[in-house]
Amino acid sequence: MTGIDLIQRIKNLPLELMVIIFNYYEASTKYGIIKTLYGHHGCIYSLAVLPDGTLASVSEDKSIKIWDIKTGDCIKTLRGHYDWIRSLALLKDGTLASGSDDETIKIWDVKSGECLVTLGDNDYRVTLLVGLTDGSLVSLCNDNTIRLWNTNWKIYPTN
């Protein structure tokens, strides 16, 4: 089976909704599935690798799941959005940003699971987040805008 065949099979799966970790063998064109992570109850939209080596994923089920890649276990679930979560971005300070169809961006302390701040100046769904090397955050919304956010969270009120 080629990598393209494998991707086609995954795309045709029913919404069992899983995160699959692939291993690429440089010496050949073979792909091997190392683990399949189950736990979301909706389409998975984004992934981020965290500084401690864990994996974060977001989904239509309105949750952020933190995965231990070695064991395949979901070690934490973060909740706070009330609509589909579309995007994740790791920020320079180690926090995690999530963007949602609920028109908010939330900044999370992953270790504690606490939402540090909610940014709600979006009038449309947040479709993509990117953490920049200077520590700021960029968001794309479905109103055809790009917003650059100050990441000095102390100036924003907490939830």
Image (cartoon, helix red, strand yellow):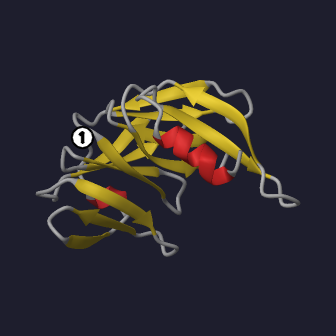
> Residue 98 appears at what percent x and percent y?
37, 48
> Residue 60 appears at what percent x and percent y?
32, 35
Toward which corner of the image does residue 85 lie, by quadrant?
Answer: top left
Toward which corner of the image does residue 35 lie, by quadrant?
Answer: top right
Q: Nearer the viewer, residue 147 or 23?
A: 23
- Number of numbered tags placed on the structure image: 1
Residue that badge 1 annotates: 159
17 left or right, relative to 147? right
Q: State the residue lying farthest toward the left.
A: 123
- Identified at 16% across, 58% down, the residue is 122
- Identified at 41% across, 35% down, the residue is 114
- Identified at 38% across, 51% down, the residue is 87
Q: Secondary structure at mark 1?
A: loop
Q: Is residue 101 above or below residue 17?
A: below
Q: Nearer the viewer, residue 97 or 55?
A: 55
Placement of the C terminus among the 4 image quadrants: top left
> Residue 103 appears at what percent x and percent y?
18, 50
- Identified at 53% across, 50% down, the residue is 48
Q: Nearer the viewer, residue 9 or 66?
A: 9
What residue type is disc 1 on? Asn
| Residue 16 at least partly seen | yes
32 left or right, relative to 158? right
Dot 1 surroundings within 10 Å: few (below 14), some, or many (20 or more)?
few
> Residue 38 appears at what percent x and percent y?
54, 25
